[in-house]
Image (cartoon, rainbow, N blue to C red):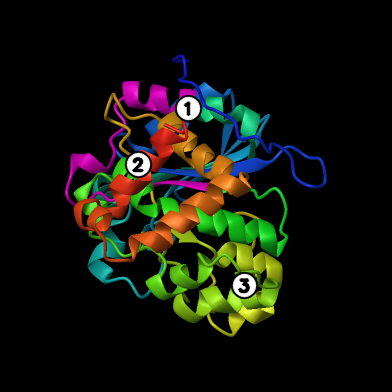
């Protein structure tokens, strides 16, 4: 397998229970047929594939079960015996499915979904993605209708409101910077599922005296962001914390309860030789480090509040430029 680049680690590697923190990873791509992708990933991970259902395959590894699937429920669930299908399609049988398969694999992303991977093992995902690139995997830039993503679901060190607030504040401050580094493809820029949090919510979040309990934290967010379509989606976390409260704002079967954040912003530019999983991961680690550094987080919050004022600096510098300069001055980049 290809040698991976360096994946950095945050200072806080364990949960409050003492277990190593884990991250779920979702990779969307094209360029390889479904069967070819299954065989390639199975070889890279030394796993035996098991077909769960049409276009859903499980790969048992020492890290847990990886899943490879076609990211389209209607195609995965298509049944030629379904009486709702036109007779002309049903009568063609296997020939129809071959045509549907070929079309689906061209325009619908294939997705690799990891189990919760210990932070110290994410280098194996980096190696896998380098091999996929060498074998012809394609990412977002290949076609205008591709909007492929690389999603991270990092487990939090603990679920105390104060910890959550720090992570939320670090993300809100870094959103423009992260987007400039990992949201490069025009097809994803036109989508709605990587939107920032509402400015009203961020202004509340960035106050120095913002110190809500869990219920207030959730309500403050959901009042302005009652949707999965955010670059950092908090609904899986909120479902884990208090599903009943979440249901007052959003009811959606796609929301999976888990004690993680759901980072949806990065695109998957896998066929670009200068793009690496480690680049996305390491920028997330910068967010982790800032969330854990009270003094630096306070500086960044103050800069954010100052950026809303009319002065010479703000007239000549965007918030992205200000953030970048601050990160450089503090040695993060």
Identify residue for label 3: 217
Q: Considering the numbered disc 1 on the image, is that residue within a helix, a strand or a loop?
A: helix
Between the residue at mark 3 and the residue at mark 2, the CA separation in whole angstroms equals 28 Å
**Magenta-colored stretch includes residue 139:** yes
Q: Between residue 45 and residue 303, name the one nearer to us.
A: 303
Identity of the residue furthest to the front in this view = 312
Q: Between residue 141 and residue 90, name the one nearer to us.
A: 141
Which residue is painted at 55% across and 53% down in the image? 298
Screen quadrant of the C terminus: top left
Q: Considering the numbered disc 2 on the image, is that residue within a helix, a strand or a loop?
A: helix
x, y percent for residue 40: 44, 26
Q: Which residues are magenta?
A: 127-152
Res 324 label? 2
**Magenta-colored stretch includes residue 163:** no
Identity of the residue furthest to the right in this view = 17
**Nearest-to-viewer mark from 1 and 2:** 2
Which residue is painted at 21% across and 41% down in the image? 141
Which residue is painted at 28% across and 51% down in the image? 147
Q: Between residue 314 and residue 324, name the one nearer to us.
A: 314
Q: Is residue 184 left or right of residue 154?
A: left
Identify residue for label 1: 126
Between the residue at mark 1 and the residue at mark 2, the CA separation in whole angstroms equals 26 Å
């Amino acid at each position: 397998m290809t040698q991976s680049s360096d994946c950095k680690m945050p200072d806080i590697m364990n949960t409050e229970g003492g277990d190593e923190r884990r991250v779920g990873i979702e990779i969307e791509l094209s360029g390889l047929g479904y069967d070819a992708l299954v065989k390639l990933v199975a070889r890279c991970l030394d796993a035996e594939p098991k077909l769960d259902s049409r276009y859903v395959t499980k790969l048992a590894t020492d890290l847990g079960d990886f899943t490879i699937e076609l990211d389209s429920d209607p195609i995965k669930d298509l049944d030629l015996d379904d009486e709702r299908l036109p007779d002309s399609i049903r009568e063609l049988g296997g020939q129809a499915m071959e045509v549907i398969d070929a079309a689906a694999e061209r325009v619908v992303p294939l997705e690799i979904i990891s189990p919760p991977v210990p932070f110290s093992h994410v280098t194996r995902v980096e190696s896998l993605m380098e091999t996929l690139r060498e074998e012809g995997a394609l990412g977002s830039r290949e076609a205008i209708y591709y909007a492929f993503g690389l999603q991270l679901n990092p487990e939090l060190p603990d679920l105390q409101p104060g910890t959550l607030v720090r992570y939320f504040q670090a993300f809100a401050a870094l959103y423009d910077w992260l987007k400039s580094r990992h949201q490069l493809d025009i097809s994803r820029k036109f989508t709605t599922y990587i939107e920032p949090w509402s400015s009203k919510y961020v202004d509340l979040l960035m106050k120095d005296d913002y110190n809500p309990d869990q219920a207030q934290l959730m309500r403050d967010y959901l009042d302005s962001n009652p949707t999965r379509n955010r670059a950092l989606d908090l609904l899986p976390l909120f479902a884990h914390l208090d599903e009943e409260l979440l249901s007052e704002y959003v009811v959606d079967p796609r929301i999976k309860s888990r004690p993680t954040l759901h980072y949806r912003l990065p695109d998957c530019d896998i066929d670009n030789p200068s793009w690496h999983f480690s680049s996305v991961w390491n920028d997330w680690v910068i967010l982790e480090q800032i969330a854990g550094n009270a003094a630096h987080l306070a500086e960044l919050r103050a800069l954010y509040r100052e950026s809303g004022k009319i002065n010479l600096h703000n007239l000549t510098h965007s918030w992205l430029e200000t953030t970048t300069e601050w990160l450089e001055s503090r040695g993060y980049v």
